[in-house]
Image (cartoon, helix red, strand yellow):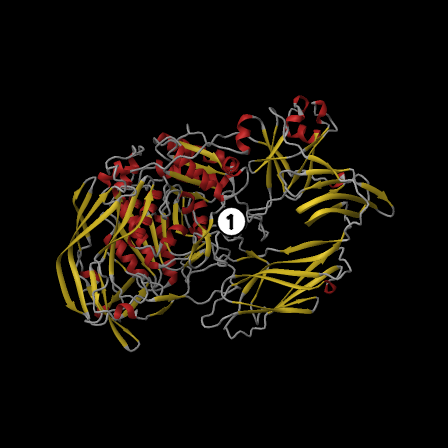
Amino acid sequence: MAHRREIIVWIFLGYIIITGEAIPQGIQQLSTLPSCRILDADSDRLEIDVRFPHPTIGTVQLQQTTYRSVSLRGCHFTERPGAPRLPVKGWLVAIPPEARIGLNVVAEEVRTMPIGRLLPAPRFAFPPPDALASFPVSLPAPILSYEEDASIYGQDAFFPSTLVALGDRGWFRDQAYVRLLVRPVQYNPVRGMLRWVRSLRITLTFESASPRESIAESIAPRPENGFMERFYRAAFLNAGVAQSWRRPLEGQSEVSGAHSLAQESPAYKLLVDEDGLYAISYADLQTAGLPVSTIDPRTFKIFNRGKEVAIWVIGEDDGVFNPGDVLLFFGRRRDSKYGFTNVYWLTYGGDRGARMKVRRGDPQGTSPATIFRRTVHREEDHIYRSLVPRREGVDHFYWNFWFPPNVATLTYECSLSQVAAVSFSATLRARLVGLTDIPGIDPDHHLQLFLNDQFLGDIRWDGPTEHLVEVTFPQSLLMEGTNVIRLEAPNDTGAATDQGFVDWFEIDYAARFVAENNVFRFSRAQSGEEEFRITGFTSPMVSIFDITDPFHVERIVNPTITKSSAITVQFRDVIDGRREYLLLTPDRYRKPRAIIRDNPSRLRSTDNGADYLIITHGDFYDAVAPLADWRAAQGLRAMIVDVQDVYDEFNDGLFAPEAIRDFLAYAYANWRPPAPAFVLLVGDGTFDFKDNLGTGERNFIPPFLRMVSPFLGEAASENSYVTVRGDDVLPEMFIGRLPVNTPQEASAVVEKILEYEREVAGDWTRRIMFVADNADRAGPFDLFSDIVADEHLPPEFEAEKIYLNITHPNPDEARQAIRDGINQGRLIVNYVGHSAIQLWAAERLLEVSQCRNDLSSLTNADRWPMVLSLSSVDGFFHFPGFPALSESLLRAKDKGAIGWWGGAGLGLSAGHHLMDVGFFDAVFREGITEIGAAAARGYMELHSQTESFDFLINTYVLFGDPALRLSALQP
């Protein structure tokens, strides 16, 4: 393949590749890679011999400065901005847990040479984000700055000071490990000298942290399956002697709380969406399937989040639940980014349940309070922006944004009722979140706040941070009914742009004691005895509840009720601190949205055991059953789990991805060994848990949104579901997802998987397609692809290269070649370059969208490729209304892809390249053919070389069955 003849320099966070005449020894001329050979390994030490090829020296002109560069084939680079940019090579070493590690290094074949000024590692910056952008695309070209670190470049000493270093420790399943980093090239900036070590002998010694315990004395390791032992041998330098060091994760206790009761007696879930008093009648329970005629109502119990809730059962005294009897409880809606639905658990039998206490509220004739402080909260969620704030677990939906001069004025309406005509200091609060952060400008956000056209003050703060506003003002500014809040962005900070988001407003004001629609709720914060007089009811059947503690609600009886133009209720109470009250008539009692019988699942039983776990939404249970049967026939302990059972047992019935992670952690630590190895999630999901955007798309299996992306902030992190041990990023289980939305889609994908593994491989499985975008400042995509194709693919496999502007100068020709290759059949399609959610490259090399649907031209039944997309966001499966390219090809019936490994976030090409190398080496050199395990080896290759790209591990997604074995490579 002919490369460009002109001198081109690509510099990008981890790789510098210089082509043409600037290379004294070109990349293609080098014939060796770094090697590592074990000389001695036992329970106390590891001795290895490491050898490196000759370095490649190049020249880089940056403005008025001429720099030299140095690289070693097969090595990554140091990344500290401003430090000399030097090669580094890493390996993972298995170690005894908590052992003290000694390190001894003997350098052999050391050579020193003059080199002049060595290029420093760059500092990277990206253009500021745009509040108007609705969804992510590939990263723009980075802004690179080269500034020498004076503390290093001013020292007459070789940098780095040591040739070998130990990185952070971590865990992979039951094996502790440490990163071993070798820096074979050192640089003295004052003398302009380079020192290169051809060979090193490295010895690590392991000493027990406890003087009473030797390394050999440890807890017996749990057994592992054969395929996992093969994985250990590929992952760790010294896996052969490390098995005895494995330590099982300490198990967790058995289930406690509401669902433990559900295991012993019938349990029913009561779904609650709003705060209020809930009434359940005889007919309600009968319809739900309870044997109401035989239940002793005195044994009714209700639980929420594992705690019993005090209830009121009218008519229970006779021990029979009769028609006309009613069960009442105070329910709260859930306040979570995952939704509003709360789950209460109703059980019966056994001991008597907790009941609401009763206290008297007889008025004493003292003057009642005339006003109370009411808070009205206004919030709407129309915009999702994952970048700010950079804080774990918060809701990233906003009302709207400011972006002067395009959007300089924002207005909001807030309806207030029963505004008292009194002298009172009202309060307006707001949560604002800045987006932009302009260097040199502080503060870079300025807004002006108005209420009913009255100026309340200036708001100033700096950076992409949350800002809570609290302003007091005279109550006289408020009006009964609609009040208008206005924000204006004068755009006068001196910053190039001022962007941010509005989350919510709330107003505290003095309100009159007047019920509306036969409901009145208020709170009081003081000490002593006080009387309250509430008017406005239309019925005398008013009940009073103290709801200060929602688990221990109490009834207040014996108020004075008088009739005039409206019914008035007066009662007395002794307040100690803060009290909250609810008054209402029976017509305002609520009904649970649903009453659902629970089917106990016993996922916490330690008698369970599985190698292969399918966690599916109930809609797809039958569709995935044939896949579980197939895996069982292959010798795996296969188990299907309904995700609702996971929520029930690990989050008291509440929808949340954390429950899935907690279940997997529990199963890993407590189930019969071997611990689960493969996890398949079946069901699509979106970041819009509450359907704020109105697409109607369901969260069958939710994405695990975490603050893991340096560019997007919050991103879908499938890896976080299976990192259940230690603080490192390596997964304990191999995870994949089938992002299906209907039983038909689920069946189509399962049928593809089964047919793929059952069919005899054809010639097409010996061909690999390599696709590369045209190079730019984001990376030398074609050269990255060449390295994988030429150095990591065995010669018995055929490499087909489709490189934009190189092998295929015309985008139309490249597009057609990609489609033709897929239709003919390719074992793997490997893409390196830019992408968006629904397409590859700005030239739209492959696309499935409303604009163009390349699926319509695919006819590759029985010849489905595994797609490795070393790019950004084409795995962004969780954007509602925009099916990702990865999803579309996987879900396609009888065509498309059998699997797809791609990013749900934005990434960098140097990190992508390391993962690509790891996947290919796993498949073609290490005999790891299960795609989930091969992807994990890609993560390990990345993690072993650098921690700068760990975010890629947390944002990459495997679409497909992680236990799928690549055709023609199956053992």
Q: Residue at x 39, y 41 (%)?
A: 961
Q: Nearer the viewer, residue 800 or 245?
A: 245
Mark 1: secondary structure = loop
Q: Is residue 510 left or right of residue 138?
A: right
Q: Residue at x 47, y 40 (%)?
A: 660
Q: Nearer the viewer, residue 305 or 287?
A: 305
x, y percent for residue 60: 26, 71
- Label 1 packing within 10 angstroms: few (<14), some (14-19), many (20+): many
Q: Residue furthest left?
A: 109
Q: Residue furthest bottom?
A: 64
Disc 1 target residue: 686
The answer to which quarter of the image holds residue 455 is bottom right
The answer to which quarter of the image holds residue 614 is top left
Q: Is residue 833 left or right of residue 583?
A: left
Q: Nearer the viewer, residue 643 or 898?
A: 643
Look at label 1 and name its amino acid: Thr
Q: Where 717 falls versus 354 (above or below)?
A: below
